[in-house]
Image: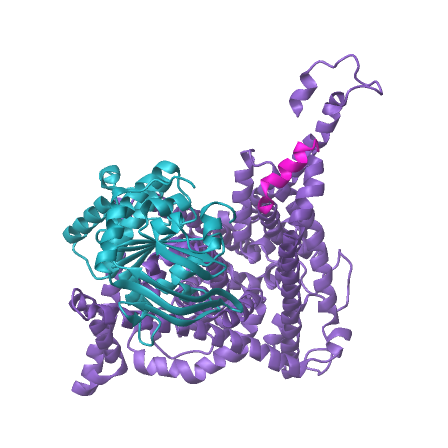
Chain colours: A purple, B cyan
Amino acid sequence: MPEASGTQTPKWAGRPDAPRVARMSSVALGDVALEYVTLAFGLVVIVLIFWIGYGLWKESEVSRHMFGWRLLRSSEWDVPKQSYGALPFIYGTVVSSALGLILAAPVAIGCALFLTEMAPRFLAGPIAFLIELLAAVPSVIYGLWGFLVLCPWMQDHVNPWLEAHFGTFALFAGPATMTNMLAAGLILAIMMLPFITSVSREVILTVPAAQREASLGLGATRWETIRRVVLAHARLGIVGAVMLALGRAIGETMAVVMVIGNNPQISASLLQPGYTMPALLANQFNEAYTDDVQRSALIEIALILFVITLLVTAAARGIILLMNRRDAASSSKAAPLARVAMPLLRWAVILAFGFLLLTQVLTDVRRHGVQGLFGPIEAVVLVYLIGASADRWTRNTKLWNPYRKVINAIGHLILGSSAFVACLVLGLLLGYVVAQGGHALRLSLFTQLPAPPGEPGGGMKNGILGTGVLVGIAAAISIPVGLLGGIFLAEFRTRRIGGVIRFCADVLNGIPSVVIGMFAYTAFVLPVKHFSAAAGGAALGIMMIPTILTTTQQMMLLVPGALREASLGLGATRLRTTISVVLPAARAGIITGTLLALARVAGETAPLLFTAFGNDQASIRLSEPISSMTMMIYRYATSAYPDWIAQAWAGALVLVALVLIVSLLARIAARNRFALR
Amino acid sequence: MIKLPVYDHQEEAARRLVEESRVSRLATRNLNFYYNSFQALHEITVEIPANRITAFIGPSGCGKTTLLRCFNRMNDEIPGSRHTGEVLLDGHDIYARGVDPVDLRRRVGMVFQRPNPFPMSIFDNVAYGPRIHGERKLSRLREIVEKSLRQAALWDDVKDRLGKNALELSGGQQQRLCIARTLAVEPEVILMDEPCSALDPTATFRIEELMVELAERYTLVINTHNLQQAARVAHYTGFLLSGRLIEFSETERMFTQPSDQRTEDYVRGRFG
């Protein structure tokens, strides 16, 4: 401790027979070093946040001066005229993310509830594993599947139907294009589905069994228990999961860029193409790095994305805080805001739906006369009205109990079908990757360099090497920072700065990879005017830091305090205790988290486009551009050559296999952890 | 021989019981219960008399909780559990085809070992049951909540703060809240699984008083590992050992002249 140096040194200090107390100051030195060294690494996270903000701010100077606020208001993006407006991109980002969220959240929550509350164990275990696996599948693979399978299928089967039946709504006005806003929303939904499901599932699993039993013991049905007790308990965590997913959707690049159509227009119709901010960055940056104005405008777009993510993170925290306060107050004296806002929201939704349905019914009648009243939409409305009013007229009658049981059965059906839909879609995706990839997988994929465009043959040797090198650099950067910073957060909890570091780690975790890529470009590529493997690895490393930091902290906090006290009580120093007691106890968990983080960045594409750039040669030099599996999959999938498309599938299969292996390894490590306890 | 405190009503009740030969409310016939391959209950046959307190005693792991949870089919919640034999409520097998545990649990309520109030207000906790059973009028709900809290001897403690979160109550108050919550659905039988094991002596005393009062209107089945508690409140006591019902008789007889050597050893504190 620092105070120790201020005390007077006794006479006998330094003599060989001096009492052990005299050595206190030297022993404490190790502890002081532990505290300040780990603190230094923790501070890296804070520095990074400011550095990212500053880097993007500085490099977007040209654009900010030329366009000012016009960039946000204008919807013209014309490179030759040097006129840049971001409105269509902001619009596309908001609409596609919102659409994805609306589609994914109910299904994902239903699926999570099915897994925790309904499914027998032999079913729940494998499905949960499959979903966790899919949450780790790289986004470029979702894009590949969306572009090559989903979009053509939608164009053949769904879009014409939507146009024919709902074409009168602006939302579904034709003519539909193959890649469009709806496809982007769907792909985002499919990507968010496993993420929201697995996080919600973990939250729901923490609801104590005693709470469920209390409710069932009072004669509640399972559905009532889920609605009133389980969801009430897990609400905060689920909202958190959904907000996190929203942040990811806003920053998602690869999946969206391949399916949205990339046309900067603001159209109310979901069947028309759109454009998002991350997609713009991915598409235009490669041609823009020589044009100062365009580059600056693109960096400003990244800055806007950065600010939006900060706002979403802050909003997520705010909502959680608000709901916490509402929980603390009683529900009968709920916070006035919640009491007014919730019914208002409910009525707004009911009125909006009512209006839409009413116009549809009227249109049907106008078109087909009285017969128009017997369409599918009218049936849905009728069933809903009967169901909604049944609640009223069965109350306090003999029919109340049967009614509750019917509702219970319907609830089960809804949860079961959410799980079915989720499994079906994710199973299809996985099935396509395995079938198409397995068909195209050759040994040459691993041993040969790419063939010239259009010629058959060749492989992805450069990409495989490149991914290895990039992940290696990322690990070398992020593991020391994350591990030591995590140690500081877990072992020096009394320090206030820990909260700031935690918050910055959350923010850093929420920053889209494409923004981190832009930052790495401004920080590591611009100064030397040269793309490099080092810059790509640094971008990936920055992305890994918050994950490893958080895992380390959480795993170390799981180590019981009694274990630390046992060691400290035997006279061991803090340093000693941390190294030989706490870290070994938390080791398995930390390794698991690190492995999963590695698998995640191995699947990253967007940040590499502006940093590692790609390279057709099998280079492993850090100062040279380098390729990666993911960049090659992206390039091949969007090419016109069947052989390249086949290779993209094969590459996707290799990546999925990698994720699978890492997930299994992580599982084994986690199992060992429990065996030790 | 330990001198056990006995409530006045008990002797009287025991005498009346012999005279009336009371009808049984709950009963089991050759009940065996398994968790996967482990057999938790062996051939239990027992009759639980109406409007009386019946206690089950026995060392930890003897199957008390399993038996209690059979009476309202709470064991259905545990994967891998199954049973043979019958559990009868008013002569009807509750495990029969067509019996919905949801209906059963409304008639057979349960208070758990650890107080488990919902993280809602005190009012909402008690109103939870009536609400799911279709009551929506606030005036009626208020009546039910007040009546249940009064019966559970908690009304005076909380009447000014019904809107406060139930988790702010003390452990004993939480357990009485859980009892009030059970009473609010007006069950016929109340099962209590070691309701005082997490409570201090004062809170325990109040809950015991409450049980005695409740026995006038309800059939009570309690589990306890506290022999004095069984002796103090129960009219009937059953002794379980390794999943077998060793002895079942009036409480007083059980504690003064047990017919089985193992019961005698247990009630005299020689093992368990």
Give the residue at x 69% y 80%. Answer: A441
Give the prevailing secondary structure in the magenta stretch: helix
Residue A608 versus residue A571: which sits nearer the camera?
A: A571
Point out the image quarter for the N terminus of chain A.
Answer: top right
A380 on left or right of A304: left
B102 on left or right of A74: left
Q: Quadrant of residue B163?
A: top left
Q: Residue B39, can we see it?
A: yes
Q: Position of residue B199 (x, y in %)?
A: 39, 41
Q: Position of residue A283 (x, y in %)?
A: 56, 65
Magenta segment: A557-572
Residue A135 versus residue B218: which sits nearer the camera?
A: B218
A127 on left or right of A110: right
Note whether A196 is above or below A583 in the view shown.
Answer: below
- Queried whether the magenta region covers residue A565, the answer comes back as yes
Note whether B47 is above or below B164 in the view shown.
Answer: below
Q: Position of residue A343 (x, y in %)?
A: 24, 55
Note whether B175 is above or below A93 in the view shown.
Answer: above
- Queried whether the magenta region covers residue A73, the answer comes back as no
Instruction: Point out the residue furthest to the right here.
Output: A16
Residue B34 versus residue B127: which sits nearer the camera?
A: B34
Residue A38 versus residue B170: which sits nearer the camera?
A: B170
Give the residue at x 72% y 24%. Answer: A24
Q: Quadrant of residue A118?
A: bottom left
Give the residue at x 76% y 56%. Answer: A622
Q: Residue A80, can we see it?
A: no
A428 on left or right of A380: right
